[in-house]
Amino acid sequence: MGLLQLLALVSLLIQATAFTSQEPARPGPTAQPIASPSPTPTPLPPPTVKIDAYRTAAARIIGAAVTSDRAYTKLAHLTDHIGHRLSGSKSLERAIEWAISEMKRDGLENVRGEKVMVPHWVRGEESLEMLRPAPGKLTMLGLGNSIGTSAEGITAEAVVVRDFGELEKLGEGARGKIVVYNAPYTNYGATVLYRLQGASRAARYGAVGALVRSITPVSLQTPHTGAMQYDPAQPKIPVAAITIEAAELLQRMNDRGDHPKLRLKMEAKFLPDAESANVIAELKGSEKPDEIVLISGHYDSWDVGQGAHDDGGSCIVVWEAARLLKELGLRPRRTIRVVLYTNEENGLRGGNAYRDTHREELAKHVLAIEADSGVYRPEGFGLVATAPLQVRANLQEIAKLLSGIGADRIAASGGGADIGPIMREGVIGASLDVEGSHYFDIHHTAADTLDKVNPQDLALCVATVAVMAYVVADI
Ligand SMILES: [Zn+2]
């Protein structure tokens, strides 16, 4: 069956059975062409796995996933009833307690929280005001890990640069000013450097505050938060994200010689580290229980919106994948381990703690998958570029079981922040890859809410992870 027919069938099934009261604001899967497989430089050896014996199981998994509303119902509870989940917050700990009790009710095995101490940054009240030439409020969001201002705030002239090169040219011209970075989005990895390093690089020239154009290709006056890092060699100055609209406004004023004057107020601060936990649940392997296929996401989020796509949705996907296999009576030979990491966003303490706690069994981790790109229509997996060619060939073969839902691509690279620490110890890592054209529209914003999640896409993500995890764990 072609993809379009299958999606049409899936749509019908879903409309007929499951999601009638939960139609998303966004329309169903768009009929985009499937991306061609990423080029792999070296020819792959023939696969050493045979997938024919798994066709029936894969079809059962996909059928069960797309006709179940349990993933969406769980995500709705997490987002609407618990809400966003910043490290140190009560809501993150409520979410952890809920997951542990529900995973036990789902019949998953070895369900537990593994204690992790996490940083506890709080935003407090914050505001940005233009005093001249056009007095009024500007929409902003403080960046995570930033220090705050004094109660009166910082009042200073703004100076706008488009990139670090313009900052270097400006040099001492930044002294006593609020430096505004108006760097247009190119890709996340490149543009995010302004968020991460902008404050310290401006502080080096005596700036008293920094504002960073939100790391996003589009904006409807939406500021995007996210972590920043201080260079210990420079003085710490407060830093916040502003919208594309505000950055462009300040750029125009700057270029006309208006010398805009701003007042930035932020109460941001760190409280003492808080106790949190990585959530772990398993489907124990029937023959080689000590060998592990890890499927994971990060359970914490920023303190705005609901953390629906980032990364609550992915946590529900990996959890539901394991539950669905259990329900279908598909117990693989190796263990499937679900991990919901704490504190990815502003510390990575969860990923590091997992590596430290499980160091003895890392050699028995067959594959570690992390989902952290939103729960849009799945396209396949990104396999770490350094994976042995035989592993790549075999995963590509297994992924053929997902061709019916268009999720059979094994991209040339992949991995994830939380599995990074164990990948550096030699574990082979992969990411769940999804259609990503709208992820950064809402990433780290108040708009990352459940209405942006398409239940059909979410169900297909569950199917994709469940099929891959099951077959890798069993083959
Ligand atoms: Zn994330």
Image (tube, rainbow, N blue to C red):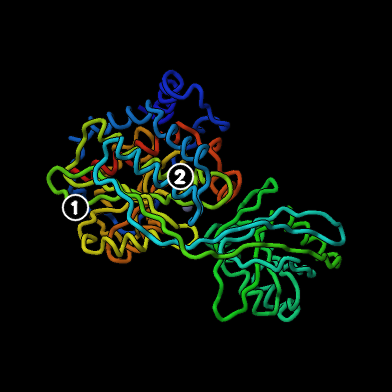
Q: Position of residue 436 (x, y in %)?
A: 50, 46
- The 10 Å Cα crowd at callout 2, few under 14, some 14 to 19, many 20 or more, is many
Task: Report the residue at 61% width, 58% height from top.
Answer: 123
Q: Quadrant of the C terminus?
A: top left
Residue type, label 1: Glu
Q: With respect to residue 276, does 327 lie above or below? A: above
Q: Nearer the viewer, residue 441 or 74?
A: 74
> Is ligand 1 closer than 8 angstroms to the Cβ of mark 2?
no
Task: Report the residue at 38% width, 29% height from top.
Answer: 66
Q: Position of residue 421 (x, y in %)?
A: 35, 64
Q: With respect to residue 57, does 112 lie above or below? A: below
Residue indicated by mark 1: 291
Q: With respect to residue 231, does 146 lie above or below? A: above
Residue type, label 2: Gly
Q: In screen coordinates, is 194 left or right of 68?
A: right
Task: Report the residue at 54% width, 78% height from top.
Answer: 232
Q: Position of residue 371 (x, y in %)?
A: 40, 48
Residue indicated by mark 2: 312
Q: In screen coordinates, is 37 left or right of 159?
A: left
The part of the image, by quadrant, that contains residue 425 is bottom left
Q: Earlier in the sequence, mark 2 or mark 1?
A: 1
Label 1: element kind: strand
Per the rendering, the mark at residue 69 is: none
Please state the total of marks drawn on the protein image. 2
Residue furthest to the left in view is 287
Q: Nearer the viewer, mark 2 or mark 1?
A: 2
Q: Position of residue 41 (x, y in %)?
A: 35, 59
Any part of residue 222 in sight = yes
Q: In screen coordinates, is 196 left or right of 335?
A: right
Distance of mark 2 from mark 1, alpha carbons? Answer: 27 Å
Any part of residue 437 in sight = no
Label 2: element kind: helix
